[in-house]
Amino acid sequence: MKNIFKIYQTIGLMGVLVLGAASCEDFLDRPAEDNYTVDNFYETDDQCYQAVNPLYNSPWYDVQRFFIQAGEVLSGNYYYSCDYLTFTVNSTNDALNLCSASLWSVNAYANGIIENIDMKAGSNVSESVKNTVKGEALVWKAMAYFFLVRTFGEVPIIHKNSDDIAANTYNDKYKATKENVYDYIIKTLEKAAEWLPEQNKGGRIDRYSAYGLLAKVYLAKAGVTGTLNQTDLNNAATYAKEVIDKSGRHLLPVYSDLFRPQNNINEEALISWAWKAGRDPWTQQNSLQCDLSMTGFSEFNDNWGTWMGPTIDLQNAFSESALSKTRNNRDARRKATMMMYSDHYDYFWTDKGGFDWNYLALQIDGNLNGVGANCVKFLVGDAYDHQQAGIGAMDNMANGLFTHLLRLADVYLIYAEAKVLLNQVDASVLNAFNQVRLRSFPNDTPRTSLSWQDVWKERRLELAGEGDRWYDYVRWHYYAPDQAIAEIKAQKRSTYTGLKDFYTSSSTTPDPSVTYYDKNPTIPNVMDQSFTLPFPEADVSMNQHLTEPAQDIDISQFAY
């Protein structure tokens, strides 16, 4: 473990040559194992694309569990009895350690790709492909740092791994300030946008992917000093409007279609983890269904999510209640986010006539969590569903459902929030907000005015379960710490007793003496320091400067 950063440097420079094989038709085609060395690779446009392809999945694999536990459990969107629910995460937490290692791996891999393209790409490689591949790598690098700064706060900036290792300073880096890190992310994305084409091959990152992420980064950065920065808010709105007006992308008409494997590549998804089914090489695949789905959901005996599910607080946000046997279904996002009593899904178990929550929860599994709801997003279904989607054969802990990290709807809401905070709500802002809301809530009255709370709640409903909500709280806490803490403490994060008794009875209403909410719920001990997680002990053991104050760093020293 003490040499893990050096190991990831090796991955960054050499890993593209040993990460296995895939079909030639797949845009995530990889170099065949052991067929090449760095010196005889990078000779064609296709090889350069193959070199960057693993950045769309493998180095991110060990972020998946943290993605849910931090993004959703910490935020109060998901109930799961773990350290994240109770704000007791420490430096030995497995998900935290794996996430940190993965994020530094992404950075090293991206740095290695850029260096190899600059040094090794042959004369047969077009300049546009060189720039495109480097631009894709820079967006993934920026995404890694965006996770790092919002998770740990002040972190070191490792611009070029090979230089730091050659100088023997890799494990001797001081932390940069949060403002430095945000400026570094912005600089990285600006260069990526310069290099990337306006349109890329299906599913790949393009210039508007970079612009969308820039908008999100600027919105987060706006409050990092403790007060909202008007220039940052203007930049967030400007970049978001570039995507909205010029990308040619539109919201998909049906919300649930975003999360179906046959729509892995769709015009609303700006940046996605592009997983591949299969376990060879291990880490190319999506394993989220295993943690999130109920026992018996697939044939592989790899479903462990019975005891995890959307919180009562999130249900209330959707105007739903597990204490009712009927669903209101006014907002289509509810059913696409959480499955509850009486829910039927045509797109799961299509070989069996569809999937019924009651059948699995009450008859097959026979166990219920205390919130009366289970996850829908990130589930692909059974092996037949996966095969029919045209993404190959599913395996144990391995499916090919993409994970969308940045969607057009997110960009619409970024635009709306930035403009609300600037007190500049006009027709374009209302249109952006209403497009998102009315897609899934068509009977709602279009908004003719907009408050920050309106956008805040809409972000929760639109993006619930997508690993993002905690980071909304982090950026809110930057400039309104008391309000962020108070909202989390007021959440209904506990459970009901007696749900199964109610669901298996003939009554349409629960007996309050049998079925009731926790009478003495634990209030999470949320403090200012809760909004940055501790560095993993493995990281600190390698670099003691992580325990010391950050240093202000001149970002202009870093060039691409």
Image: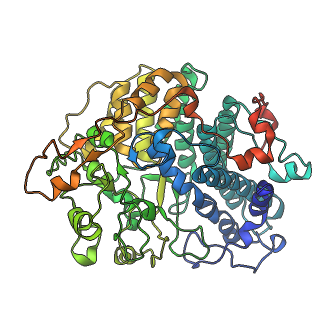
Percent position of residue 221, x then y: 58, 30
Residue located at (50% from left, 44% from top) = 84
**Colouring chosen for the image of the structure:** rainbow
262 or 77, which is in the foreground?
77
Residue located at (47% from left, 58% from top) = 403
Residue located at (23% from left, 33% from top) = 446
321 or 550, which is in the foreground?
321
Please, which residue is most extreme toward the right here? 167
Percent position of residue 24, x then y: 59, 78
> What is the number of callouts on the image?
0
Dividing the picture into quadrants, the one containing residue 339 is bottom left
Does residue 196 appear in this view? Answer: no
Dividing the picture into quadrants, the one containing residue 427 is top left
Q: Specify whether 290 is left or right of 232.
A: left
> Relative to residue 69, is residue 456 depicted above or below?
above
Q: Specify whether 309 is left or right of 96.
A: left
